[in-house]
C-alpha cells in the first residue's frame, strides 16, 4: 500500500493505493525461467482537494494486467547477472488510461 502527497500547484491529492505483483514460472535449466506475470492495482481512497472536479466523484482507479515473463541468470566473469523481462497487457481498467507495459531490468549481484 502506498500513500500519495498533495500537489500544491493544483491542490490535488491522489488517494492511497494498493499494488500487488505476481509471477509463476518454469525453470528450464541453464539459468532460464519462462512464465506468466501480472499485477493488480486498486486505489483505496478517493482523490481529494479543491482541484478535484465534483464530476469525478472520487475518481478511484483500478486495473489488472497479465503477460509473459522471462528471467535469465548468468555470470559475467565471476559476477552473477540477472536479466528480467516482463510484458503486461492491462484489462478491467477503470478511471485511468488503458495501457500495455514492457519492463526490462538487469541486476549485478555483489
Image: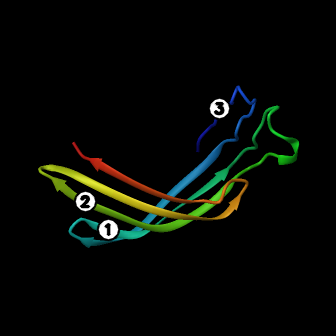
Badge 1 marks a residue whose secondary structure is strand
Q: Residue furthest top?
A: 8
Residue annotated with mark 3: 5
State the residue in front, 30 or 20.
30
Which mark, by number, is residue 73?
A: 2
* Residue 35 locus on image (x, y percent): 40, 70
Choose the circle earlier in sequence order: 3 or 1.
Answer: 3
Distance from disc 2 to disc 1, alpha carbons, whole Å, reads 9 Å
Distance from disc 3 to disc 1, alpha carbons, whole Å, reads 38 Å
* Residue 57 locus on image (x, y percent): 84, 47
Q: Quadrant of residue 65?
A: bottom right
Badge 3 marks a residue whose secondary structure is loop
Crowd tier of the residue under label 3, counting other residues whose Cα lies within 10 Å: few below 14, some 14–19, many 20 or above: few
Choose the circle earlier in sequence order: 3 or 2.
Answer: 3
Q: How many marks?
A: 3
Badge 2 marks a residue whose secondary structure is strand
Residue annotated with mark 1: 33
Choose the circle earlier in sequence order: 2 or 1.
Answer: 1
Q: Tell me the residue at 76%/43% (across/down).
A: 46
Amino acid at each position: 500500500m502506498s500513500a500519495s502527497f498533495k500537489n500544491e500547484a493544483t491542490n490535488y491529492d491522489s488517494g492511497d493505493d494498493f499494488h500487488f505483483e505476481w509471477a509463476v514460472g518454469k525453470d528450464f535449466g541453464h539459468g532460464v525461467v519462462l512464465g506468466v506475470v501480472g499485477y493488480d492495482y486498486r486505489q483505496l481512497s478517493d482523490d481529494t482537494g479543491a482541484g478535484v472536479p465534483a464530476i469525478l466523484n472520487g475518481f478511484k482507479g483500478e486495473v489488472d494486467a497479465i503477460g509473459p515473463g522471462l528471467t535469465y541468470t548468468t555470470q559475467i566473469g565471476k559476477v552473477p547477472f540477472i536479466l528480467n523481462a516482463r510484458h503486461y497487457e492491462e484489462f478491467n481498467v477503470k478511471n485511468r488510461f488503458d495501457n500495455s507495459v514492457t519492463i526490462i531490468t538487469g541486476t549485478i549481484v555483489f
